[in-house]
Structures are given as C-alpha cells and as structure tokens.
Image (cartoon, rainbow, N blue to C red):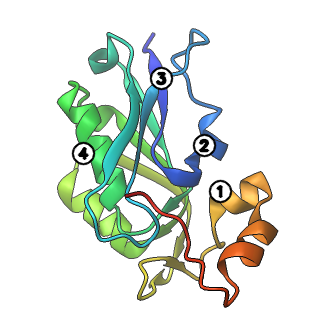
Amino acid sequence: ISRVSGGVGLGGGVGIGSVGGDGLGKGSGSRSSSGRGSPVVPRVIYEKFPADIKDRYVLLLDPILATGVSSMAAIDRLIKSGVRQDRIMFVTIIAASQGIHALCMRYPHMKIITSEVDAGLDESNRVVPGVGEFGDRYFGTEEMRAKFFDDESGFEEPGFD
C-alpha cells in the first residue's frame, strides 16, 4: 500500500486543502504565494512535510492554475525534499493553457488533473473567463472585496510583500 500526502499549493487553495493530510489525521504540506498578478518571485509561507515524504505520492491542490509560477515554487520544494515528479499529482479546478504548458515543460513526468481548461490569461495574468477570486467565493468575502477594494476610494488590493 502506498502512502499519500495532500498539500495546499496556494492562495485560495485553503478551501480545497481540507481534503489533504497524510492519512494519519495530521496535516502536511507547503503553502506558497506570489500575490495576485504579481511579477515577484513566489515565497514559501508555510511548509511541513512528513519525514517520509520522498516515499509518498503527493496531491498538490490549487483551485486555479494561471501562469504556474507559484505552483512551480511548491513543486520545486517537493522535489527538493526528495519527491519524484511521477509521484506528484497537481489537482486544479480551472486551468489556463499557459499554466498547463509551463508545468508540463518543466515537469514532464508530473500528472496534472483539472476539470476545465479556460481560454487563457488577461493582462493581469488572471484566468479568463475564470470564476473570479476562488478564495473570496469559498469564504463568502466577495461583497467585502467589492466594498473595500473595487470602489474608487483609492484602496488597493492587498498583496504579499
């Protein structure tokens, strides 16, 4: 019997990350982010892997795959920890073709599982047509974002520095 670990890749992935874990009731994984539409290099925010991670299959969960830059940061951490590419399954709900292409070029032996491939990316590197901000939809904060960040009051959307 093979052991499987689940990991939350990024941002709004917290919503689908609750299905992860190492099969023993202990959560494990890595979380990275570069902020929405950010050109900066992603940084790892949190990482906790089981000691035997290199011997496991890993489900890396991310609701939306856009450019793949943040995903690559999480995948690189797994590979650095000894996980083989062919044991990583990247699971996403919606993906842009550019993100799929980027991941397949860099990790040819990794599996990508998605329910839909959308048309592409807009000028801010957001998937179009997409579903909006997955995290806001999951946590029910869409109206708050509209009230505080989408009006003309001068507030900008928060990001990671």
Quadrant in which the N terminus appears: top left
Q: CA distance from mark 4 to mark 3?
A: 23 Å
Q: CA distance from mark 4 to mark 1?
A: 29 Å
Given contact means CB atoms under 8 Å apart, are the residues at marks 2 and 1 in contact? yes
Q: Is label 2 in a helix, a strand or a loop?
A: helix
Query: Counting residues from the N terminus, which is met first, the one under dot 3 or under dot 2?
Result: 2
Asked whether, in this view, residue 113 is left or right of residue 149, the answer is left
What residue does disc 1 label? Answer: 135
Query: Counting residues from the N terminus, which is met first, the one under dot 4 or under dot 1?
Result: 4
Q: Is label 1 in a helix, a strand or a loop?
A: helix
Reply above or below: 157 against 82.
Answer: below
Q: Is label 4 in a helix, a strand or a loop?
A: loop
What residue does disc 2 label? Answer: 14
Disc number lying in front (4 or 2): 2
Amino acid type shown at disc 1: Gly
Query: Counting residues from the N terminus, which is met first, the one under dot 3 or under dot 1?
Result: 3
Front in this rendered view, residue 113 or 68 = 68
Label 2 packing within 10 angstroms: few (<14), some (14-19), many (20+): many
Quadrant in which the C terminus appears: bottom left
The structure residue drawn at horizontal position 31% and vertical position 54%, both measured from the top left corner, is: 42
Q: CA distance from mark 4 to mark 2?
A: 26 Å
Amino acid type shown at disc 2: Val
Q: In the rendered image, which quarter is residue 147 located in?
A: bottom right
Residue 148: where, in percent of width, then height? 71, 74
The structure residue drawn at horizontal position 26% and vertical position 36%, both measured from the top left corner, is: 77
What residue does disc 4 label? Answer: 109
Q: CA distance from mark 2 to mark 1?
A: 8 Å
Asked whether, in this view, residue 12 is left or right of residue 153, the answer is left
Q: In the rendered image, which quarter is residue 18 located in?
A: top right
Query: Counting residues from the N terminus, which is met first, the one under dot 2 or under dot 1?
Result: 2
